[in-house]
Amino acid sequence: MNRLLSLIAWVHQAPIVKEDGVGGPRRAVPHIWAPRSNFGLLVEPRYLLAPSDNYSADRWLALALYKEGLNSKSVFYSLFSFWKMIEVAIVNKDVRWGWINSMAPLLMIARDRITKIASEHDNVAEYLDYSCRCAIAHVFREPVINPDDYADYVRISQDVHVVEELARRAVDEHLPSRVDV
């Protein structure tokens, strides 16, 4: 069930969670809903029938991290989950940074934000790694991100879209969608 939810979240780019029924009879199958919407989620049957049983373990891990990033109510933890996807897809840090710096100008969704980051920082990957990921993960190392600081919240709210787009591209390019049998 969890893999199915991860696959649906990946394909539809929408958060999806399982819930138990409250105040009624227990369901045999968990209730599925999209937490940030007031409407149902249309699941295309062709995606459910697509052969995903040959996905690599790393691709399944990346899809699970993507689902968690989408489901998080915190932009800080969303960014952290998306960054982990990039680390799963591109294990070597130097290769990862090179790929991020070469890919950054090609981003479409977060184009305005990446342009601003590139104008302020020579190394986009270094900025995203140290000023975002490390700042979120390590509370006592500079730079420090304070979730209650409005400027930090706004900056991470913008940067999360950059990291999400990079994560999706990293998974598609570096993790096989099919494992040769």
Image: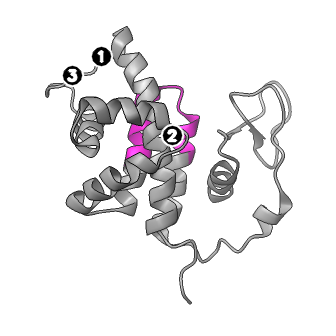
Q: Which residues are magenta?
A: 67-83
Magenta span includes 68: yes
Provide the residue designation for mark 1. Answer: 146
Which sits in the foreground, 71 or 101?
A: 101
**Residue with the mark numbered 2:** 69
Residue located 53% across and 32% down the image: 72
- In the picture, the quarter occupied by the N terminus is bottom right
Q: Quadrant of the rendered structure where residue 135 is?
A: top left
Instruction: Kindly identify the amino acid type of the residue bearing the numbered disc 3.
Output: Val
Secondary structure of the residue carrying numbered label 3 = loop
Q: Earlier in the sequence, mark 2 or mark 3?
A: 2
Residue under circle 3? Answer: 144
| CB under 8 Å between discs 3 and 1 | yes
Q: How far is mark 3 from mark 1, CA to CA? A: 6 Å
Sequence order check, earlier mark of 1 and 2: 2
Q: Residue at x 43, y 31 (%)?
A: 113
Can you name the residue that lies furthest to the bottom here? 181
In the image, is residue 7 above or below residue 139?
A: below
Residue 135 circle label: none
